[in-house]
Amino acid sequence: MDRLVENHKGPQRAEHAGLENYLSETFYDDGAPNSTIEMEDGLLHGESLHFDRDSNLISKYQFSEGLKHGIAKTYYPGKLIKSATPWARNKRHGQVLRHIK
């Protein structure tokens, strides 16, 4: 699993050896973190973090029962926020804020 499917219409589910709650982590070939994803009952639930090859945070999403829910943020290298998008039950909810460098 390299990246989450961002255009998914319904709950996003993953099977992981019958575990109910767990933290899924993926890594690049060199061992640098690629993603950290919180799961509950086989669904994305909680925080989902994605990193570039230099370990810079590039995106942070919030999920509830497999659906985007909360403020999704993307980042420029160095933690400067690139965009903030509000989500409610997998639908954009409000204005998307963008920061132009």
Image (cartoon, rainbow, N blue to C red):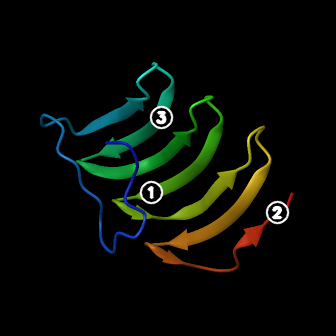
Asked whether the beta carbons under mark 2 and mark 3 sit within 8 Å of each other, the answer is: no
Q: Earlier in the sequence, mark 1 or mark 2?
A: 1
Q: Residue at horizontal 46%, vertical 19%? A: 30
Q: Which residue is mark 1?
A: 63
**x%, y% of residue 42?**
23, 48
**x%, y% of residue 86?**
62, 70
The type of residue carrying mark 1 is Phe
The type of residue carrying mark 3 is Asn
Marks 1 and 2, how far apart in space? 23 Å
Marks 2 and 3, how far apart in space? 24 Å
Q: Residue at horizontal 74%, vertical 48%? A: 76
Which SS class for mark 3? strand
Q: Residue at horizontal 39%, vertical 53%? A: 4
Q: Which residue is mark 2?
A: 99
**x%, y% of residue 9?**
33, 75
Which SS class for mark 2? loop
Q: Residues within 10 Å of mark 3 (few under 14, many from 20)?
A: many
Q: Earlier in the sequence, mark 2 or mark 3?
A: 3
The type of residue carrying mark 2 is His
Q: Residues within 10 Å of mark 2 (few under 14, many from 20)?
A: few
Query: Viewer-nearest of labels 1 and 2?
Result: 2
Q: Residue furthest right?
A: 101
Q: Which residue is mark 3?
A: 34
Q: Residue at horizontal 49%, vertical 28%? A: 33
- Seen in the picture, residue 11 relative to 41 is either above or below; the reply is below
In which quadrant of the rendered image does the C terminus lie?
A: bottom right
Asked whether the beta carbons under mark 1 and mark 2 sit within 8 Å of each other, the answer is: no
